[in-house]
């Protein structure tokens, strides 16, 4: 009996344990109260997922983790029947940031210093940080006694205004800087290095002579670095005195230095424990040699070179210790680069900040890494460029943050949004065709979800074009881009006796084959109606009628550029094929190949070579329609009007069966800090020829065109502005040139 009771108790306990265990498994996670922040982001921060065991204290852990993000003002967690329900109240958004009492600083200058701006998420701790930043701004301008008192005004719809009351105080200036002990470099040479300046005739009323003790310490480091870059490894400041001149608000700075002797580089050695890294190859490619004047900056450049070289062999985590041995007798510095594989570090959490309109997942889906992945600098840099290439943000920063675990890092993605809607108007002028007007409106981040909607149109004396498109870059949250197009075109060319109306629809799906390679499948259907008048030639009468073209095709893209945003190295190779004949009245095969190569020529200079080639030919006893022939000009042969180059029949431009365009560019940023202006010098060469020989003799068979020019791009306050000035130097009398064009966009 006792054994039976013991067995019964055991069975009951076992069943109860199984029952409890079954019910401790998390089967579903609900999140309530979300407005701006995505469901996926909450789960990422909470570090919880389904099909895991719910343990005691789990709710408190989730609450703490979500509070730590500073995204929520209230968090509660309930667990019932294997379902976790997280209820959050998002911190309010900032409606306005206002400043009172600022007389010497403009509102926009103060806004540039703070993190909490209009439409960002309110956080009381960040207000304290912003006050500190503003005070530092005033201190840098010599107003050491400035005070700032912040206040918060509560509004409806979970919004707040932040008001900063500012007392700027009196400015303190530096009236004199004295350097004692220098002989290798003059006082003026050293003062040019420093950011602290004395008032001059042109700087007296500016903050250039403001006293800032932190800036003086910074200047000492700049001067020390300057001497080190010129071989003075033992340079030191023996004393620095800042004294307030009695009876004034001015300071005198007295710096005493000890320069020491100038040193040269001694023997160079590389000691590597990484088998794939050849020490001799590294030594041969370093940017200095034994006997050169010692330069500390060269050491930094060498370390970066070794890191980049190691990364090409798959070594992400390496340690480089540049060991310096100073030989006082020979006045040389011997350098040994000790290279070893470093400890692996993993990504703990990915935090996103600054996106007030764009939802988190639009940014996260561009990342080549996620929580738990091994830290990879190349993946981080490429992800940064991918986010930039979205063109949703003015700036993108990915910063590392240490955690309590030595082998884990948080990655903080800070973005600053910009206007993604644009209205564009443009014009082009040609010698023979007069003015062409273009207009369009687009939104590349529709509802903050990364979708693109676009409508464009162009008008000229010979052609009207309308095009509307919608693109979903991540269909069903997969790396699957889907696009739909609807367009209409009316053409009435000069010097011809016919007009053409074309209506078409298009659909495409793009997906990745590997990290940098993609394929796009597409289909389009278009109907054209050409009407010839009573004066039409025999050729023009052949064009009359209605045709339907059904086209299926693909685009294969092989991309090894170092950046999709502004590449400075690498290349992109594209193959496109389109087959018409699955229905419709036309049978033809179209082939297009393009290759773009980028090469860094200098610090801010990039060279590019771009080539294009295409062919189109009918089959099955049919020809490709004339309106599907290749045309060049416009952006792929600058200096010539699009479609007004090449073969002629009865004074009509027909396009051709074959074409090629070769363009060389030298791209550089103009050194204008206040404006984001880039420029390129270009040389374009190309030709278009052939027409199946179906209409007899064709004028202008395979003749070369070429142009040179300059292209200016200005990302202005109102939107992007583009200017093209081109001079064709190889052309035919029948060509219609387009020497100058521009377009202006307005962002909203």
Image (cartoon, grey):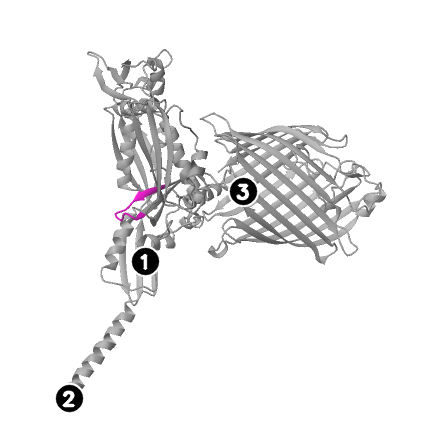
Residue 447: give x, y in percent of width and height.
46, 47
Q: Do the residues labelled 1 and 3 touch (CB within 8 Å)?
A: no
Location of residue 489 in the rendering, given as x and y in whole percent from the top left corner: 68, 44
- Which is more N-terminal, label 3 or label 1? 1
Task: Report how far apart the C-alphas of labels 2 and 3 lie in the structure.
Answer: 84 Å
Q: SS at mark 2?
A: loop
Which residue extends farthest front? 329
Q: What segment carries the magenta color?
A: 399-408
Instruction: Give above or below for 321 relative to 33.
Output: above
Q: Name the residue under label 1.
A: 48
In this rendering, the label closer to the viewer, 1 or 2: 2
Nearest the camera: 259 or 22?
A: 259
Q: Pointer 2: what residue?
A: 1
The quarter holding residue 102 reads top left
Residue holding disc 3: 442
Using a 10 Å C-alpha cutoff, classify the residue at mark 2 as few (fewer than 14 neighbours), some (14 to 19) or many (20 or more). Answer: few
Residue 503 shows which numbered tag?
none
Q: In which quarter of the image is residue 14?
A: bottom left
Q: Which of marks 2 and 3 is nearer the N terminus?
A: 2
């Amino acid at each position: 009996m006792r054994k039976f009771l013991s067995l019964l108790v055991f069975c009951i306990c076992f069943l109860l344990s199984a029952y409890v265990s079954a019910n401790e498994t998390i089967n579903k996670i609900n999140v309530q109260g979300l407005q701006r922040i995505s469901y996926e982001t909450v789960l990422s921060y909470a570090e919880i997922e389904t099909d895991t065991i719910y343990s005691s204290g789990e709710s408190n852990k989730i609450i703490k983790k979500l509070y730590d993000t500073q995204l929520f003002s209230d968090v509660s967690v309930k667990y019932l029947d294997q379902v976790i329900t997280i209820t959050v109240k998002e911190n309010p958004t900032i409606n306005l940031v206002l400043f009172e009492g600022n007389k010497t600083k403009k509102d926009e200058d103060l806004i540039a210093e703070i993190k909490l701006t209009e439409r960002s998420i309110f956080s009381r701790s960040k207000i304290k940080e912003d006050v500190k930043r503003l005070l530092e701004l005033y201190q840098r301008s010599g107003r050491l006694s400035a005070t700032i008192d912040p206040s918060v005004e509560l509004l409806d719809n979970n919004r707040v205004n932040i008001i900063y009351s500012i007392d700027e105080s009196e400015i303190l200036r530096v009236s004199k800087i004295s350097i004692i002990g220098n002989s290798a470099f003059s006082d003026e040479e050293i003062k040019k290095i420093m950011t602290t300046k004395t008032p001059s005739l042109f700087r007296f009323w500016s903050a250039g002579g403001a006293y800032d003790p932190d800036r003086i310490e910074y200047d000492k480091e700049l001067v020390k670095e300057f001497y080190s870059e010129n071989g003075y490894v033992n340079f030191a400041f023996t004393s620095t005195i800042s004294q307030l001149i009695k009876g004034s608000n001015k300071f005198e700075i007295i710096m005493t230095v000890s320069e020491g002797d100038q040193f040269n580089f001694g023997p160079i050695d590389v000691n590597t424990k990484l088998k794939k890294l050849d020490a001799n190859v590294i030594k041969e490619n370093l940017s200095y040699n034994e006997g050169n004047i010692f330069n500390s900056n060269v050491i930094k450049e060498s370390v970066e070179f070794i890191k980049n070289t190691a990364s090409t062999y798959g070594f992400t985590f390496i340690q480089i210790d540049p060991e310096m041995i100073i030989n006082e007798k020979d006045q040389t510095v011997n350098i040994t680069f000790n290279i070893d594989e470093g400890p692996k570090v993993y990504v703990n959490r990915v935090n996103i900040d600054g996106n007030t309109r764009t939802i988190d997942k639009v940014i996260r889906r561009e990342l080549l890494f996620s929580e738990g992945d091994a830290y990879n600098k190349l993946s981080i840099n490429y992800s940064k460029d991918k986010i930039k290439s979205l063109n949703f943000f003015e700036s993108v920063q990915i910063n590392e943050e240490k955690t309590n675990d030595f082998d884990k890092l948080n990655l903080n993605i800070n973005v600053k949004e910009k206007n993604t809607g644009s209205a564009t108007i443009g014009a082009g002028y040609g010698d023979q065709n007069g003015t062409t007007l273009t207009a369009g409106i687009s939104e590349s981040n529709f509802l903050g979800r990364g979708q693109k909607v676009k409508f464009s149109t162009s008008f000229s004396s010979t052609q009207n074009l309308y095009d509307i498109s919608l693109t979903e870059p991540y269909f069903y949250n997969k790396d699957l881009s889907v696009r739909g197009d609807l367009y209409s075109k009316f053409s009435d060319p000069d010097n011809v006796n016919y007009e053409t109306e074309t209506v078409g629809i298009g659909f495409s799906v793009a997906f990745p084959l590997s990290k940098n390679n993609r394929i796009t499948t597409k289909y389009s259907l278009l109907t054209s109606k050409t009407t010839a008048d009573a004066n039409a030639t025999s050729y023009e009468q052949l064009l009359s009628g209605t045709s339907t073209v059904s086209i299926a095709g693909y685009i294969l893209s092989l991309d090894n550029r170092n950046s999709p945003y502004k590449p400075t190295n690498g290349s992109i190779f594209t193959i496109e094929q389109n087959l018409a004949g699955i229905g419709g009245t036309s049978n033809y095969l179209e082939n297009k190949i393009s290759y773009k190569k980028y090469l860094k020529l200098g610090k801010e200079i990039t060279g590019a070579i771009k080539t294009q080639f295409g062919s189109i030919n009918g089959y099955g006893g049919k020809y490709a329609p004339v309106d599907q022939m290749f045309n060049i000009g416009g952006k792929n042969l600058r200096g010539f009007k699009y479609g007004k180059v090449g073969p002629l029949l009865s004074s009509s431009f027909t396009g051709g069966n074959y074409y090629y365009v070769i363009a060389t560019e030298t791209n550089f940023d103009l050194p204008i800090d206040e404006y984001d202006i880039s420029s390129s010098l270009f040389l374009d060469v190309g030709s278009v020829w052939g027409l199946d020989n179906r209409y007899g003799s064709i004028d202008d068979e395979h003749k070369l065109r070429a142009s040179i020019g300059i292209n200016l791009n200005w990302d202005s306050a109102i939107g992007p502005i583009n200017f093209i000035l081109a001079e064709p130097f190889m052309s035919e009398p029948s060509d219609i040139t387009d020497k100058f064009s521009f377009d202006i966009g307005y962002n909203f």
